[in-house]
Image (cartoon, rainbow, N blue to C red):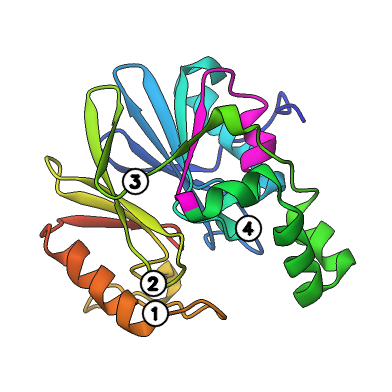
Amino acid sequence: MTTPANAVPKITAVGEGIFAVDTEYLRPLMDASHLIIDNGRAAFVDTGTNYSVPNLLAALASQGLEPGDVDYVFLTHIHLDHAGGAGELIKHLPAARVCVHPRGARHICEPEKLIAGTIAVYGENAYHQLYGDIQPIDSERIIEIEDGQRMQVGSRVFELIHTPGHALHHYCMVDAQARLIFTGDTFGVSYRETDTSRGAFIIPTTTPVHFDPEAAHASIDRLMSYAPEACYLTHYSR
């Protein structure tokens, strides 16, 4: 897969060095990959699906960066609207490693169970229409993220914390200095068309079968203990 020469990057600046890239999963402004840029280095947070990869590469190019400038692809969890494109994307990013919860690592190395489970729910035709053909990732390119592990993108330091609830294998990324968090699905979803004069309307995500309400409450409390000024949701951004 290559980026078309006329590809228009669907990218919005949502913070200092942070861009929301519309993956166009299902519809516009449904699912975002966040591009972090600092001192010429970059990382993606979640990827969308295989069909999202041209948008991500176009967004990178729009900021004057090359694929080799990407150090990490952070997967908050391995549900396919967040991680389905990781195997395809990583083919284009020669220096990047994929950061995933230890519970999810084996499933992106050997995605057969993910694929079978998705086909069981949606059917084979819909699976291919929604996600394409999920590509495995070589284990040598994977970093299994421990709770509290710190990772650096340029000069920005992120603390990665395990946040079970939405999924057992979920983590979030905290930039304590900038007081912001990339929350994946832990903090729910918030679509811009539901915003009101009182602010954003946030909807909890209770995806079966691993949703754990008590763990979800504890994870949200943990996130709020950082007193963030901004949270970046995959569905949909700040």
Instruction: Tell me: 212 left or right of 54.
Output: left
The kind of secondary structure element at disc 1 is loop
The amino acid type of the residue labelled 4 equals Leu
Residue found at the very far bottom of the displayed protein = 213
Instruction: Tell me: 220 left or right of 90.
Output: left
Kindly report which numbered mark, 2 or 3, lies closer to the viewer in this rendering. 3
Q: Which mark is residue 102?
A: none
Distance, label 1 to label 2, CA atoms, is 5 Å
Question: Upstream in the sequence, badge 4 or badge 3?
Answer: 4
Q: Position of residue 19 (x, y in %)?
A: 39, 40
Residue drawn at the location 29% of the way across and 18% of the way down: 39
Distance, label 4 to label 1, CA atoms, is 19 Å
Q: Nearer the viewer, residue 163 or 51?
A: 163
Establish if 174 lies above or below 113.
Answer: above
Q: Position of residue 142 (x, y in %)?
A: 53, 34
Q: Which residue position holds label 2? A: 188
Residue found at the very far right of the displayed protein = 125
Label 2: few (<14), some (14–19) or many (≥20) C-alpha neighbours in 10 Å: some
Kindly report which numbered mark, 4 or 3, lies closer to the viewer in this rendering. 3
Label 3: few (<14), some (14–19) or many (≥20) C-alpha neighbours in 10 Å: some
The amino acid type of the residue labelled 1 equals Ile
Question: Upstream in the sequence, badge 1 or badge 3?
Answer: 3
Question: Upstream in the sequence, badge 4 or badge 1?
Answer: 4
Q: Which residue position holds label 4? A: 80
Question: Upstream in the sequence, badge 1 or badge 2?
Answer: 2
Distance, label 4 to label 3, CA atoms, is 22 Å
Label 4: few (<14), some (14–19) or many (≥20) C-alpha neighbours in 10 Å: many
Q: Which residues lie in the magenta part?
A: 86-102
Q: Which residue position holds label 1? A: 203
The kind of secondary structure element at disc 2 is loop
Q: Nearer the viewer, residue 199 or 205?
A: 205
Distance, label 4 to label 2, CA atoms, is 16 Å
